[in-house]
Image (cartoon, grey):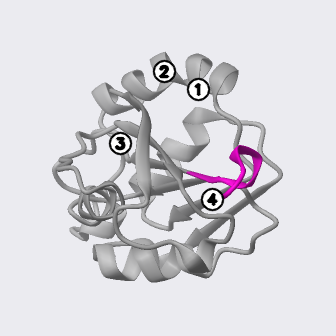
Amino acid sequence: MTSISALKKLYLLRHAEAELFSASGKDFDRKLSSTGQNSILNVAPIYRKTLTVDAVFCSSASRTKETWKLLNLNVGTCSFHSELYGASSDELFHFIQGIPNVFSHVLLIGHNPGLSDLASYLTDEFYSLKTGQLLEIELESSEWKMISRGIGTEKRNIF
């Protein structure tokens, strides 16, 4: 069994509520609605006090980038990835298996249904994340590449 200090933590955050349409007509370009902006601004101080995150991996879509910006977390590493936009749970799973082990606590900001399906796969529990919902999962693994189905345990669920 892995020692407690070696466990990985994965935070899954679905972007906040977005506008129905973008000026360009592309889903990728949809920005947060005023409701979405306000909801993230309301929870941001709580997240800043309670989350310990080494790295953030964020979809490069407008609404996820805006969600990240409004959170204003103090994190050393943040990167944006086009492959996280519309990613399936399988694609997300393979993405997190490739995370370097120097990162123990990772925040992944993305979209449904991929995030919910990934949470369900990792925990063997059903999830349907709402916009702006954060799920903290502790993984029974000391290496990202060794994660597998059902090794996660929900530690916190905030929405």
Q: 131 or 33, which is in the foreground?
A: 131
Q: 43 or 147, which is in the foreground?
A: 147
Closer to the N terminus: mark 3 or mark 1? 3
What residue is pinned by disc 4?
Answer: 1
User: x, y percentage for residue 148?
Assistant: 43, 73
Residue at (32%, 56%) from the top-left corner? Answer: 119
Residue at (64%, 23%) from the top-left corner? Answer: 50
Amino acid carrying label 1: it is Tyr
What residue is pinned by disc 2?
Answer: 43
Instruction: Please say if the residues under marks 2 and 1 sit with CB atoms less than 8 Å apart.
Output: yes
Q: Residues within 10 Å of mark 4 (few under 14, many from 20)?
A: few
Closer to the N terminus: mark 4 or mark 3? 4
What residue is pinned by disc 1?
Answer: 47
Q: Could you tell me how far apart the alpha carbons at marks 1 and 4 are, in whole angstroms? A: 30 Å
Mark 3 or 1, which is nearer the eye?
1
**Residue 69 falls in image quadrant:** top right
- Give the magenta range: 1-9
